[in-house]
Amino acid sequence: MSQWVDYRALKQSIGIAQVLSSYHVPLQPVGGNQLRGRCPLPTHGSERSRESFSVHTAKNVWACHSASCCDARQGRVGGNILDLVALLERCSIREAALRLQEGWSTGSRVCEQLASRGSSSSPAPLQPLSFSLPLSWHPYLAQRGIDSSTAAQFEVGYYAGPGFLRGRIAFPIHDSEGRLVAYAGRSIDGSEPRYLFPPGFRKSQVVFNLHRACREVAARPAGCVIVEGFFDCLRVHQAGYSKVIALMGVNLSELQENLLLARFREVVLMLDADEAGRRATQQLAARLRESVSLHIAEVPSGRQPDQLSSEEIELILLQSEGAFRT
Ligand SMILES: [Zn+2]
């Protein structure tokens, strides 16, 4: 079956800078919507032309002025994001479009984000993905203390396919209705950034694992554990606390706050016990204290929930008096 691809929508909605950053191509801004740097294309053989590659972010186009690089591309100086990905991935334009579509899911989301940039209006809601990635078990998950049943429950796994998540552990992210809206990818070989999110995705619009944490909540009052990261969330869940959600960082947006307050009367803050986590804990506690019954989990200094054993997690949560083990 041939999949339908909207080339025009892709070219319009996906920013070339985002595409290049997903390939970890370092470029420097040189003013006037332009970026410049070393050419990342496989057609580029010249060692001398270090700054031959340029990008115009407003026009969403690229060019490399190295003569040998142009020759290897049938004399073409540059092109759009589809040409670019086709060259980088050594694939056809159609294949490149499919990869972009997969990696970026909904171009409209990026469009809407770009359209709303600079305005104070609330961001467009996340659109459900029309596909899911084939993921498999990887020993890295065991290294992080995740067992196979937890990985299966969260549908987390290694992605070997094409696109920006290639070679990463992919975490499916769902909206509060349980619809898949994005994947985040964790590198497993130490490469930076450790976590990749699709361009256009805003962590502030969604709470990781909220749909599962709410599943058994028949009626309020009910409580949840709030952690920072994906692995924290999986480990706390694995320790027997299924009502756990992750902020994917230390920030709580107004939208996230509303999602939580609409569902929970009691929360336990279990952020990392580093400086950023401690500071965020104090801020969130001050913010949430009036709306919910609030507890703070005493994570040992310098540690984070995903580094704790199930027994340690249980002990800490029992001591924090958030009594909603499930
Ligand atoms: Zn080049």
Image: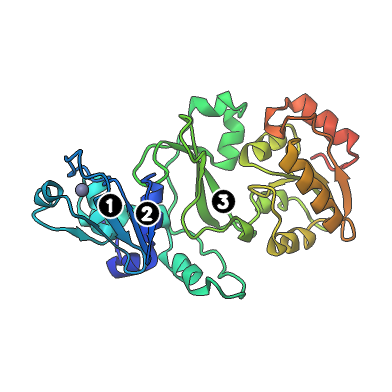
Label 1 residue SS? helix
Q: Of the residues tagged 1 and 3, which is closer to the observer?
A: 1
Say which amino acid is labelled 2. Answer: Val
What is the x, y in percent for residue 258? 74, 64
Q: Is residue 241 above or below residue 222?
A: above
The structure residue drawn at horizontal position 41% and vertical position 36%, both measured from the top left corner, is 167
Residue type pointed to by label 1: Val
Q: Quadrant of the N terminus?
A: bottom left
Upstream in sequence: badge 2 or badge 3: 2
Q: CA distance from mark 2 to mark 3?
A: 21 Å
Crowding near the residue tagged with mark 2, few <14, some 14–19, many ≥20 C-alpha atoms within 10 Å: many
Q: Is residue 280 left or right of residue 32?
A: right
Query: How far apart in space, not on screen, are marks 1 and 3 (Cα)?
Result: 25 Å
Would you name the residue on which mark 1 appears?
A: 85
Q: Residue at x 63, y 58 (%)?
A: 204
**Helix, strand or loop at mark 3:** strand
Q: Is residue 210 visible?
A: yes
Q: Would residue 297 appear left or right of 198 to someone viewing this image?
A: right
Contact between labelled residues 2 and 1, with CB atoms less than 8 Å apart: yes
Residue 271 visible (yes or no): no
Q: Position of residue 136 (x, y in %)?
A: 45, 34
The reply to whether dot 2 and dot 3 touch (C-beta < 8 Å) is no
Dot 3 amino acid type:
Ile
Q: Position of residue 274 (x, y in %)?
A: 73, 36
Q: Find the distance from the CA under tag 1 to the CA under tag 2.
A: 8 Å
Q: Nearer the viewer, residue 69 or 226?
A: 69
**Marker disc for residue 19:** 2
Seen at 61% across and 34% down, the residue is 150
Give the labeled residue for mark 3. 173
* Drawn side of residue 219 relative to residue 27, left or right: right
